[in-house]
Image: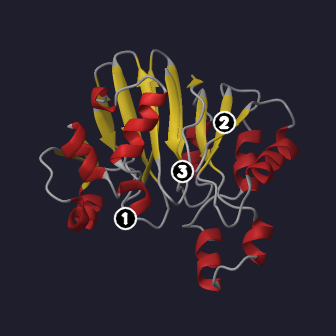
Amino acid sequence: MITFSLQSGSNGNSIYVEAGDVRLLFDAGISGIQAETRMASKRQDIRDCDAVIISHDHSDHTRCAGIFQRKFGLPIHITQQAYQRIQRYMGLVSDVRIFKGGDRLRFGDVTVQTIPTPHDGVDPVCFVVSHDDKKLGIFTDVGHPFAGLKAALADVDAAYLESNYDPDMLRNGSYPEFLKRRIAGTAGHLSNDEAARLASHHVTGKLKWVAAAHLSQENNRPDAALQAYHRRIGDTLPVHLTSRHEASDVFEV
């Protein structure tokens, strides 16, 4: 299994996963041109993907789902509630496939376990992709370290793990108080330290690497995220970075 992030952050999200003969995109928050170009930079053709799977309704994960379907012919997999919320700006689409949070989706010999999260979107989920005894977690916009996340992280070989904000930067930043409370609340995002603490419990288990994802532009820095991991786990687990502006490296699971 190989994977890379096309982009990760509040300005748009999409992650590519290839397992055997199956190629999947998770979320469609970047433009069709950006997605096609970044896929091509990794010698991949977005039209070869089998589906785009949507985590929740927020626009940084869905704003171009309609384009992905019309331009590239990708079926959209989404929950009913999230679909109802985003229909107004998706435009005309011809292939939408509904699932429920907690369902296991099958694509050939690849399975995608959907896991409901406490994030404040509409019917949000995160994912575990399984193929050939390997498991990849895609854990962003998760709200807080809920029990299902902890259990899933213990069972994956690698994970994209939300590392959204540095608490001091958020506290002292320019965001209005209500937004600070929302981000740091139980339905918001994981901080650097929350993510690092979660990973620290699994450095001697199956987990082989973590990719810090969904970093805030205003309330985080890549070096701050890496420092939080270093404080918790030192050099015992490789920690990669995703970018708000370009595709990440290609990671192997």
Could you tell me how far apart the alpha carbons at marks 1 and 3 are, in whole angstroms? 14 Å
- Which residue bears the numbered disc 3? 140
Secondary structure of the residue carrying numbered label 2? strand
Secondary structure of the residue carrying numbered label 1? loop
Left or right placement of residue 189 versus residue 231 in this view: left
Residue at the image position 57 percent from the left and 66 percent from the top? 188
Residue 74 visible? The answer is no
Residue at the image position 69 percent from the left and 80 percent from the top? 174
Left or right placement of residue 88 versus residue 123 in this view: left
Q: Percent x, y for residue 83?
A: 25, 58
Residue at the image position 70 percent from the left and 66 percent from the top? 219
Position of the C terminus, as image quadrant, is: top right
Q: Percent x, y for residue 233?
A: 83, 38
Left or right placement of residue 237 versus residue 245 in this view: right
Residue at the image position 34 percent from the left and 16 percent from the top? 21
- Which residue bears the numbered disc 2? 210
Q: Please say if the residues under marks 1 and 2 sit with CB atoms less than 8 Å apart.
A: no
Q: Where, by quadrant of the figure, is residue 9 drawn?
A: bottom right
Q: Sequence-wise, which precedes: disc 1 or disc 3? A: 1
* Relative depth, front residue between 144 and 84: 84
Q: Which mark is residue 122?
A: 1
Could you tell me how far apart the alpha carbons at marks 1 and 2 are, in whole angstroms? 26 Å
Residue 206, compared with residue 51, is above or below; it is above
The amino acid type, in three-letter code, at marker 2 is Val
The amino acid type, in three-letter code, at marker 3 is Thr
* Relative depth, front residue between 46 and 232: 46
Secondary structure of the residue carrying numbered label 3? loop
Q: Please say if the residues under marks 1 and 3 sit with CB atoms less than 8 Å apart.
A: no
The amino acid type, in three-letter code, at marker 1 is Val
Q: How many neighbours does mark 3 have within 10 angstroms: few (below 14), some (14-19), or many (20 or more)?
A: many
Q: How many neighbours does mark 1 have within 10 angstroms: few (below 14), some (14-19), or many (20 or more)?
A: some
Q: Of circles 1 and 2, which is in front?
A: 2
